[in-house]
Amino acid sequence: MALYVQKYGGTSVGDIERIRNVARRIARTRQQGHDVIAVVSAMAGETDRLLGLGRELSERPVEREMDVLVSSGEQVSAALLCIALNQMGVKAMSLMGHQARVETDSVHTKARITRVDDERLRRAIEGGHAVVVAGFQGIDEHGNITTLGRGGSDTSAVAIAAAARADVCEIYTDVEGVFTTDPNVCRSARKIERISYEEMLELSALGAKVLQIRSVELAMKYAVPIHVRSSFSDAEGTMVTGEDESLESVVVAGVTSDKKAAKVTVLGVPDQPGVVAGVFEPLAEQNISVDMIIQNVATDGTTDLTFTVTRDDLERTRDMADGLAKKVGARDFTVDPDVVKVSIVGLGMRSHAGVAAKMFRLLADEGINIEAISTSEIKTSCLIRAKYAELAVRVLHDGFGLGDR
Ligand code: ADP
Ligand code: ASP
Ligand code: MG
């Protein structure tokens, strides 16, 4: 007998018939003799609807109350799923984040899980229940409701799987697994059978929203095997696991695009020690993280500095522009949101030369200009004009031979 954690995303619980479908899956797993903890998202579109209501009332709504508001979406789907299960004769009990003791820090709207106390979960399972936990939500040390950031139910599921020592964490979604690129953007995308935590971490960080990045971090830390699969079919999905010989030996595993980047350029600053630190220290103090960085030295003793921030931080960066320009003696400070970051990811990049060069050539042949570059051991990212995003993904995907074979 095994313990399954099964996370069902918004589309999978999107209407009453789909909730029945999920209930049937859980019932089947129970009939096979296994214990189940299901973790559910809000019904498709519900989180956006609730966020919209809050924002109608205020441009900058109080974050504590936004968490109370949006977490209600998961409460509804958990209760509906339990009603469906009980109707089918499967004893089921819902638990909200606080009841399942999903403890978090107090950073409202993007809280981090600090601990899951599995005692209540255990008791419910020992009582013969299928347990349904509301994903995305937790509780801080002062008893406030918190939420884990968009896509956070993935992270709830992995944290619960780690705490309850589940045999596997199944992530049920609307595609059949992790693909070589977003299958809704590129028709030739191919399902990957097995992928390493490291590669999945990069894919999530660089825009593949199929798993929230924190869920992959936790899975890697606690060695929780993740099986990403579709709630609409019985096909095997993708196993996300540690590195071993069963992984496909490919140079590039996947291609992503991230529309959340924005480009900042500081023009004509004196080329002398302390200038770069003078720009980045105040940003860091405001918790604004900087990603791709390029510095060009001009002949007249000045230099231009280009870097990216996430779009969520764009307004705050813009607010700081004048002060920063004055402080470091810059001629101008421009902000450009019309960019996208495309990336290739793969463990094989560690041992193969020329992968980045091939990426640059593929983009150049389409007339796509590269405005910034960043690399790590297993990824290369290029910043390009936003209008080329889909073209670039397709060209890289097919150029690296990732399509259906
Ligand atoms: P859920 O509501 O089930 O959590 P999400 O919408 O958060 O589902 O994530 C699934 C979506 O992720 C897919 O519909 C797909 O468009 C997108 N996606 C982006 N990149 C990838 C990828 N490499 N593989 C699979 N899906 C991807
Ligand atoms: N309902 C939340 C969201 O839409 C959490 C999740 O679905 O994972 O972001
Ligand atoms: Mg999701």
Image: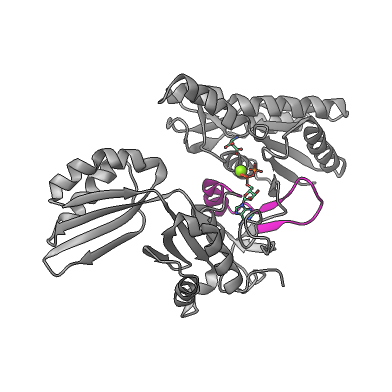
Q: Which quarter of the rendered image does ligand 3 occupy?
A: top right
Q: Is residue 231 magenta?
A: yes
249, above or below 30, in the image: below
Q: Nearer the viewer, residue 264 or 164?
A: 264
302, above or below 211, in the image: below
Residue 54 x, y percent position in the rendering = 50, 23
**Seen in the image, is 291 located left or right of residue 396?**
left
Residue 164 x, y percent position in the rendering = 65, 41
Q: Residue at x 82, y 29 (%)?
A: 85
Q: Residue at x 55, y 58 (%)?
A: 390
Q: Residue furthest top?
A: 57
Residue 89, by quadrant, is top right
Residue 262 x, y percent position in the rendering = 38, 50
From this viewpoint, is residue 178 visible? yes
Q: Nearer the viewer, residue 396 or 290?
A: 396
Q: Nearer the viewer, residue 94 or 80?
A: 80
From this viewpoint, is residue 144 visible? no
> In this figure, what is the number of numbered marks?
0
Q: Which residues are magenta?
A: 210-239
127, above or below 334, in the image: above
**Seen in the image, is 291 located left or right of residue 81?**
left
Q: Residue at x 66, y 56 (%)?
A: 183
Residue 98, by quadrant, is top right
Q: Is residue 321 magenta?
A: no
Q: Residue furthest bottom?
A: 353
Residue 10 x, y percent position in the rendering = 67, 37
Look at the image and name its color scheme. Answer: one colour
Q: Residue at x 47, y 19 (%)?
A: 57
Quadrant, the C terminus: bottom right
